Amino acid sequence: MNALVLQRCAECDYVANFWRIGCPRCLGRLEDFDAAGTGVVTTFSIIHRWVERFEPHLPIVLAIIELDEGVEIMSSLVGDDRLQIAVGSPVEIAPEGWSEKPQFRLAAAGSE
Ligand SMILES: [Zn+2]
């Protein structure tokens, strides 16, 4: 399982969607935590052509995902059903992907 680590402020609970040295809201100390790994698609783009080393993964589905923690990140989707993506699709961290970064998959209907 790809882990998705975010930072949360120990003072005010601000959650950062990328690594920061301190809380931008209160200058408090940020602590790493494991994100739930679930969210919904805010927007997406489907890429049919890219540089040669990405050809095995085409079409690549890039998505902005609003995580359950309330922050947005950009990631990509894996899975044979990834082209079924829509705005609002629930997604979850994929157990395996082709990137060293966490990738997502469409969450099964009705799953939590
Ligand atoms: Zn703070």
Image (tube, helix red, strand yellow):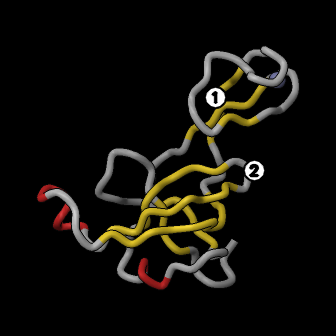
Q: Residue at x 66, y 31 (%)?
A: 7
The residue at which mark 2 appears reads as 70
Which residue appears farthest toward the left when viewing the image?
A: 52
Residue closer to the observer: 94 or 101: 101
Q: Position of residue 79 (x, y in %)?
A: 38, 74
Q: Report x, y in % for residue 99.
A: 32, 51
The quadrant of the rendering that contains the C terminus is bottom right
Instruction: Count neighbours of disc 1 (C-alpha within 10 A) and say few if under 14, some if 14 to 19, many if 20 or more.
Output: some
Q: Disc 2 versus disc 1: distance between alpha carbons? A: 16 Å
Tell me if 56 is positioned left or right of 80 in this view. Answer: left
Q: Nearer the viewer, residue 96 or 102?
A: 102
Q: Which mark is residue 32?
A: 1
Q: Is residue 26 above or below residue 108?
A: above
Q: Tag 1: residue type?
A: Asp
Front residue of this view, candidates 2 and 91: 91
Q: Is residue 34 above or below residue 66?
A: above
Ligand 1 quadrant? top right
Residue at x 66%, y 52% (from the top left corner): 36
Q: Left or right of 35: which side holds 74?
A: left
Amino acid found under the numbered disc labelled 2: Gly
Report x, y in % for residue 54: 20, 59
As rendered, which of 26 and 91 lies closer to the eye?
Answer: 26
Residue depicted at 62% across the width and 16% down the height: 21
Q: Are marks 2 and 1 in contact (CB under 8 Å)?
A: no
Q: Secondary structure at mark 2?
A: loop
- Could you tell whether 52 is left or right of 87 in the image? left
What secondary structure is found at the residue carrying circle 1? strand
Q: Residue furthest right?
A: 12
Q: Quadrant of residue 88?
A: bottom right
| Residue 80 position by quadrant | bottom left
Residue 76, percent from left and from top: 43, 60
Disc nearer the start of the sequence (2/1): 1
